[in-house]
Amino acid sequence: MAIALLALPAAATAAPQQLLAADLSQAGRKLVLTVRTSKPVPLARLQARPDTRRASARYLCLGLRGGRGERRLCLGGPQAHRRLGLVLVNARGKPVRRAAAAARVRRPRPRKLVVSLVPERAGLRPGRLRWRLLESHGCKRRDRCAQALPAAGARRFRLRPVRAVGCTGGDAGLVTHGPRDRRTVALTFDDGPGELTPDFLRVLREKGVPATFFAIGRQVPGREATLRQMLAEGHEIGDHTTDHVEYPGHSQIAGTRERIRAAAHFQPCLFRPPGGAFDAAVIATAGGLGMATVNWDVDPFDWQNPGSAAVQSRVLGATGPGSIVLMHDGGGPRGGTLAALPGIIDTLRARGYRFATVSQLLGHRLVYRPYG
């Protein structure tokens, strides 16, 4: 949804690197900036975290103001296509903090740049913002090379909250692992939401790891907020039947799908059969409801409560590229699994593994929609 389009007046286009127009919009979860210039922007020459008070500085920054000071997202640096510089400035324009934010920077045409990022990664929260573009090619006198778009003041933009409403994929079929050519794995948790689920979420949040939770329908009432928290923190929710029955019929699968939708406004595209038991009818029923059937290739048998050391050893000993790891956050005492989780994450990460939800592992994605 496009929010604002700015065009620089002809009288203000005397600087060598001219800003012609800019558009700031929100597309699902992402903030998207589109910039048009009179000639190609040399990203490699730009400073990712500039001090714009210096005439010699070279930069192209999006300035966002929602309170005191200004947050500037600047292009450039050695990873210019994957990261933005983040500079917080005070009311006098003095940098008071410098950092970075993951983003995607594309150049679909020589004189057009498209920048997209998840606002939270830059510390942006939903609300009303004022924005402008700042640009300079660097020279001896700042007033002869620095530009702003608009030339004075700023434009208004409302960053809306978003929530995950579904996911791509969901075709009928059975999956037990992801691609074996990438060191990416999916951690999955069954039989919740349970008493310890908030603690599992805390560990995942502290470690910066997304996971997939396969929920039992009868466990949802009273824990709707926990499901919403899962989605808000980047996790995925799958269907695990209403009563944890093997070879479930339509009502067991559809009933939980509806409870998840009612509790979290999320349409699951993954189904896990209890006990991993399935036949053609189970796969077809889940597929008819828009869900792929997902089992696993790593099972530490944590439901037997063998202790945290055994759970950690079994997971680490069996996990490889593309693995889908089965664990449990509900259905019984899960303190051993919870205690093993930090070590599992740290060791796999040290081995070069990255983490993804099941949909992400399979090349799909969560679908986000603004609301409010």
Image (spheres, helix red, strand yellow):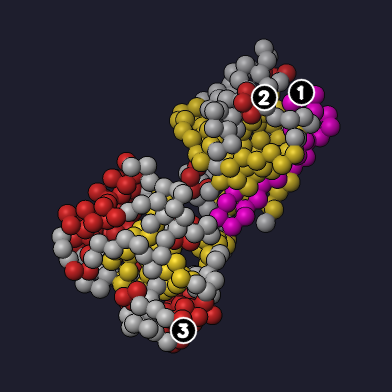
Helix, strand or loop under label 3? helix
Q: Residues within 10 Å of mark 3 (few under 14, many from 20)?
A: few
Q: Is residue 348 visible?
A: yes
Depth check: 352 or 220 in front?
352
Residue 184 on image: x %, y %: 42, 50
Identify which residue is drawn at 28% across, 63% down. Answer: 299
Q: Is residue 335 left or right of residue 350?
A: left
The quadrant in which residue 229 appears is bottom left
Magenta residue span: 6-31
17 in the magenta segment: yes
Q: Is residue 87 above or below residue 230?
A: above
Which labelled disc corresponds to residue 281?
3
- Residue ID for mark 2: 136
Identify which residue is drawn at 75% across, 39% down. Answer: 109
Label pair 2/1, CB-CB below 8 angstroms: yes
Q: Is residue 147 left or right of residue 297?
A: right
